Image (tube, grey):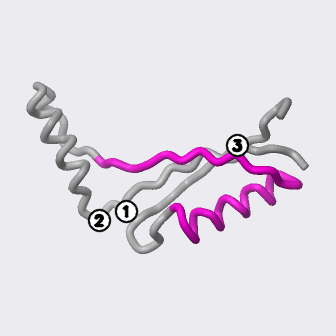
Amino acid sequence: MATYLAHINVMLRPLVNDPQGLAVRDGLHALGFEHTTSVRVGKRIEVTLDAASTSTAEQQVAQMCDRLLANAVIEDYEFTVSEVVGA
C-alpha cells in the first residue's frame, strides 16, 4: 500500500452569498485596496491516506468530500492526489 496526499479546495457555489468574502472585501477597501471588486472565501484541506493505487485514493477522497468535507447543496470541490515518495 502506498501513501497519498490529497489537496482539496472547497468553495461556495458562484450564486451562493458569501458573507465572509464580503467582510474581507470591505476590510481590504478599508486598508486602501479600493479596486478590489470581489472576494470569495473557501477552505483548503489536506488529507494523507494509504491506498492500493492512485485511482483508489481518488475514489476515497471523492467519497470524503461527498459525505463530509463539502456541502453538496451550496459548495463545489476539486482535489488533486499525489503519491508521497519515501513515506
Residue 27 in magenta stretch:
no
- Residue drawn at the location 86% of the way across and 53% of the way down: 53
What percent of the width, then of the height, locates residue 28?
17, 33
Q: Secondary structure at mark 1?
A: loop
Circle 1/circle 2 CB separation < 8 Å = yes
Position above or below: 83 against 64: above
Tag shown at residue 13: 1
Query: Residue 74 falls in which quadrant of the image?
Result: bottom left
Real-space CA distance between mark 3 and mark 2, rounded to the nearest whole angstrom: 29 Å
In the rendered image, which residue does mark 2 sit on?
A: 16
40 sits left or right of 63 in the view: left
Tag shown at residue 5: 3
Tag shown at residue 77: none
Real-space CA distance between mark 1 and mark 2, rounded to the nearest whole angstrom: 5 Å
Position above or below: 20 against 83: below
Circle 3/circle 1 CB separation < 8 Å = no
31 sits left or right of 49 in the view: left
Residue 65 in magenta stretch:
yes
- Binning the other alpha carbons within 10 Å of mark 2 as few (below 14), some (14 to 19) or many (20 upward) gives few
What percent of the width, then of the height, locates residue 1?
90, 49
- Residue drawn at the location 53% of the way across and 61% of the way down: 69
Real-space CA distance between mark 3 and mark 1, rounded to the nearest whole angstrom: 25 Å
- Residue drawn at the location 9% of the way across and 31% of the way down: 30
9 sits left or right of 47 in the view: left
The kind of residue on which mark 3 rests is: Leu
The stretch of residues the image draws in magenta is: 40-69
Circle 3 or circle 2, nearest the eye: 3
The kind of residue on which mark 1 rests is: Arg
